[in-house]
Amino acid sequence: MKKWRSALREHWQQSSLRSQIVIAFAVIGLVAVTLNAVLVGAFLRDYFAYRQGNQISTQAHSLSHCCGEDAAFLLHASPQTRASLLEAALADSPGRYAIILDEKGNLVYVSPQVSQKQLPPLLRQARYDLAHPAVSAASWTWLDNQLITGTPLTISSAATSNAHSNPTRIVGELVLGENQSVVNGIWRRSLGLVIFAGIVAVVLVFLGTLFAAQTLARPLRTMTATAQAIAQGEYKRRATPAGPRELHALGLSFNHMVDTVLQQQQAERDLIANVSHELAAPLGLIRGYAEALSDNIIDDKEQRLRVLHTISTEATRLGRLSSDLLDLAMLETRQITIYSEAIPIAELLTALCERFMAQAQQGGVEMQLDLAPNLPAIVTDGLRLEQVLVNLINNALRYTLAGGTITLGASIQGKELCLVVADTGKGMPDDVLTRIWERFYQGDESRRRREESRGSAGVGLGLAVCRNIVTLLGGRIGVESVVGQGTTFTILLPGIEV
């Protein structure tokens, strides 16, 4: 038994979704039809027995009063007349029969279809009803698979001496009956119609389920084939959204997932290529200078100092690259813990302005503050927010020429704090503006080469780090730039203290 159940379970698990749905609904339909047939069958059996019993009782009452209040006609008519009358009365019910007894319990009439085996218990019941007229007044009853009813035959006793005490007198008993097979036959025919209707319903449900299962399975098969094709390198393949609303949404989500994964793979390949490129130049330079120094090729003291300074500069750049890459990786994987505290934003911006004042003056750039009055504190990670602002100020200093201005601003917009770092530098064209958040992207190649020659070049990760930090703090960062007029970075942060 266990092996059989295990094999059945394994076969079920290996079958298709369409087969599982169709089989499940077919089994449910058959169980429902079976239960319905049992319950309806029991109800119909009682109903038809009750209906036939009431019909027999009504007919017996009508026959007992066929001649007004005088039943002497049924008792004293000739056998042929009595038989003709009863056969005509029972002609619409071929299985029905009649028995008549006189007031002494003697058999007066019995229908021909009553067998000698059936007659004795019927006579006993009829004689009992004759002796107990109150009991015989009951509607109907079962007797040895016979549905029977008894009705007393009465005549008017108005002319007799006891007319005042008993206006009618019982002079006999009329018994009508039917074999149980009559009720069973009606019941079987009705139950057969119920079962036939149930089977038709199951067939219709099966066909509808087959169609629904096919509708559900086809998009899933398409997505499975698409996933297998993509796994084999066909990266341009996409699933065609089809089917019900949920499957249509699943197809769209599947395509979006594939696009996202491919973009992530491309970003990872670009990251590896960019990191390799960023590492190759300084490592090659450090290696070349180190070999020259070790071989005493460079023996001039001043030249050796310049070489050592260059090696130090490139090592610093590699350290900055390593630090930015670590920050970016931790930010993108949400492995950085945020330590929130109340930060007085006016004090933070004032301190940053004073911190970069000397560097700005060396480049001929003016630092300004534009703070709204009564700025509240903001609950956020102060060190991470400062890291973002330092990156933005460094970029502004790098791209703002002498005579320009860098402005640090803060104001309240609705329920958010708005921070602004604006410069009057050269600005960025639209094609550069759309890519500045990409890792390692540096739009101004000429400036990058000049900064590399001075040892102050960035590595193109600062803005990517800024955006990830702002997102981690629950805020948003945006940029606007006009070529020749300058660039403005805007940060919106929640967490204002009331």
Image: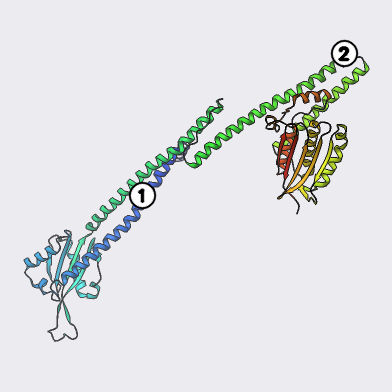
Taking the spot 18% from the left edge, 59% from the top edge, the residue there is 95
Q: Nearer the viewer, residue 56 or 210?
A: 210
Residue 380 spot, x, y in % from top left? 76, 46
Q: Nearer the viewer, residue 166 or 291?
A: 291
At label 2, which amino acid type do we have? Asp
Q: Which residue is mark 2?
A: 295
Image color mode? rainbow
Q: Which mark is residue 33?
A: 1
Taking the spot 53% from the left edge, 38% from the top edge, the residue there is 250
At label 1, which amino acid type do we have? Val
Residue 349 spot, x, y in % from top left? 82, 43
User: Can see residue 423?
Assistant: yes
User: Can see residue 16?
Assistant: no
Residue 399 spot, x, y in % from top left? 79, 31
Q: Secondary structure at mark 2?
A: loop
* Lower position in the chain sequence, tag 1 or tag 2: 1
- 322 vs 11, left or right, is right
